[in-house]
Image (cartoon, rainbow, N blue to C red):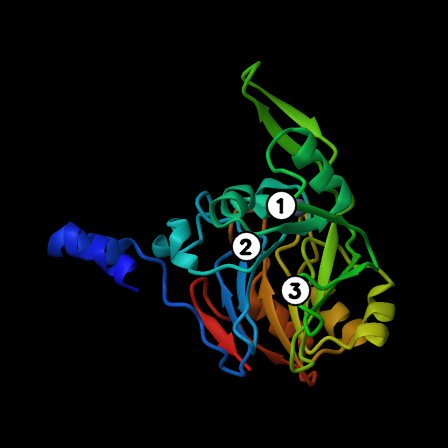
């Protein structure tokens, strides 16, 4: 403790204050609650009942809907795990930078992680390959993360510094994640997806409590397809609509989603980027 105190004394008050201003947010304590912070598009920070922090699809610094405070990647605070659903830039986003900066592993489709390794973006110790139906437990046995199908594409656009040209690389198969937390609560981050019939199987097999569901249309489900997926196929207790409004083509709105749901028995959280919900 004495050793750690000395630099503070040497730095004096002004630098110490600066260091405090730059310090990441306080470490989350085990609150027993599930917290989901939405940061625009499909970017979420999930804090588990045991205090683990999982950041998913962190498209932040170039995301027009991400609140200004979260353009600073330190604002996320402690991160224990990164999950990425596919290779598109509005999902991979700042994941490579966050992985290196915090020395935390990035889990995603095997093909995407392989390309990140081959292109020299991440070492094999940080880009962890897994596949659909594979369940991984990088945060211990009480948090189970399973990749499931997504109806989408996953090409990886990469800027080659040697040629100064963009290249398109394999991004693996796009996926969604079923995340079962310490208290049994299950979150289904659907990534980018169109409607597909096996959502029924996913609902019956995994029983998600909370859907994080894309509703913007054009590249993903529109509000009516998303409502059908919610009521007819997945039947969750809660739904947080996302992946809309970030760009003009993602025109679906939470109001349209809620209208299409009618009086279905699901609680919808039409929150704004930067807002959080807890369970
Ligand atoms: Zn996509």
Residue 213 has which mark? Answer: 3
Residue 41 has which mark? Answer: 2
Residue 40 has which mark? Answer: none
Mark nearer the viewer, 1 or 2? 1
Left-right relation of 255 to 25: right
Q: Quadrant of residue 69?
A: bottom left
Q: Residue at x 62, y 45 (%)?
A: 126
Label 1 or label 2, whichever comes before in sequence order: 2
Pointer 1: residues within 10 angstroms few (<14), some, or many (20+)? many
Decide: marks 1, 3 in contact (CB < 8 A)? no
Viewer-nearest residue: 71 or 41? 71
Q: Residue at x 25, y 58 (%)?
A: 20
**Residue 263 x %, y %:** 67, 84
Decide: marks 2, 3 in contact (CB < 8 A)? no
Label 1 or label 3, whichever comes before in sequence order: 1
Q: Residue reaching furthest left?
A: 13
Q: Residue reaching furthest top?
A: 163
Question: Looking at mark 2, is its residue's CB closer than 8 Å to ligand 1?
Answer: no
Query: Which residue is tagged 1?
Result: 126
Residue at mark 1 to residue at mark 2: CA–CA distance: 24 Å
Q: Residue at x 76, y 45 (%)?
A: 110
Pointer 3: residues within 10 angstroms few (<14), some, or many (20+)? many
- Quadrant placement of the N terminus: bottom left
Decide: marks 1, 2 in contact (CB < 8 A)? no
Count of numbered labels shown in the rendering: 3
Q: Secondary structure at mark 1?
A: loop
- Quadrant placement of the C terminus: bottom right
**Residue 132 x %, y %:** 82, 55
């Amino acid at each position: 403790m004495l050793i750690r105190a000395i630099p503070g004394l040497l730095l004096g008050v002004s630098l110490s204050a600066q260091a405090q201003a730059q310090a990441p947010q306080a470490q989350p304590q085990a609150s027993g609650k599930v917290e989901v912070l939405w940061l625009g598009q499909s970017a979420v920070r999930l804090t588990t009942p045991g205090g683990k922090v999982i950041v998913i699809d962190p498209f932040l610094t170039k995301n027009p809907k991400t609140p200004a405070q979260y353009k600073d990647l330190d604002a996320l605070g402690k991160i224990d795990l990164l999950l990425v659903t596919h290779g598109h830039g509005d999902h991979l986003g700042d994941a490579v930078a966050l992985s290196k900066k915090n020395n935390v592993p990035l889990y995603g489709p095997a093909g995407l992680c392989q390309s990140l390794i081959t292109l020299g973006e991440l070492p094999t110790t940080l880009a962890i390959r897994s596949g659909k139906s594979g369940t991984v437990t990088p945060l211990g046995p009480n948090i189970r993360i399973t990749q499931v199908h997504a109806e989408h594409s996953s090409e990886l656009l990469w800027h080659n510094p040697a040629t100064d040209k963009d290249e398109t690389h394999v991004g693996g198969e796009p996926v969604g994640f079923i995340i079962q937390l310490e208290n049994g609560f299950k979150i289904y981050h659907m990534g980018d997806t169109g409607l597909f019939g096996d959502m029924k199987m996913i609902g019956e097999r995994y029983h998600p409590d909370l859907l994080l569901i894309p509703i913007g249309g054009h590249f993903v489900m529109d509000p009516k397809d998303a409502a059908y997926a919610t009521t007819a196929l997945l039947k969750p207790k809660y739904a947080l609509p996302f992946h809309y409004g970030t760009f003009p083509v993602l025109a679906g709105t939470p109001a349209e989603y809620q209208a299409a749901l009618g009086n279905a028995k699901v609680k919808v959280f039409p929150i704004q980027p930067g807002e959080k919900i807890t369970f």
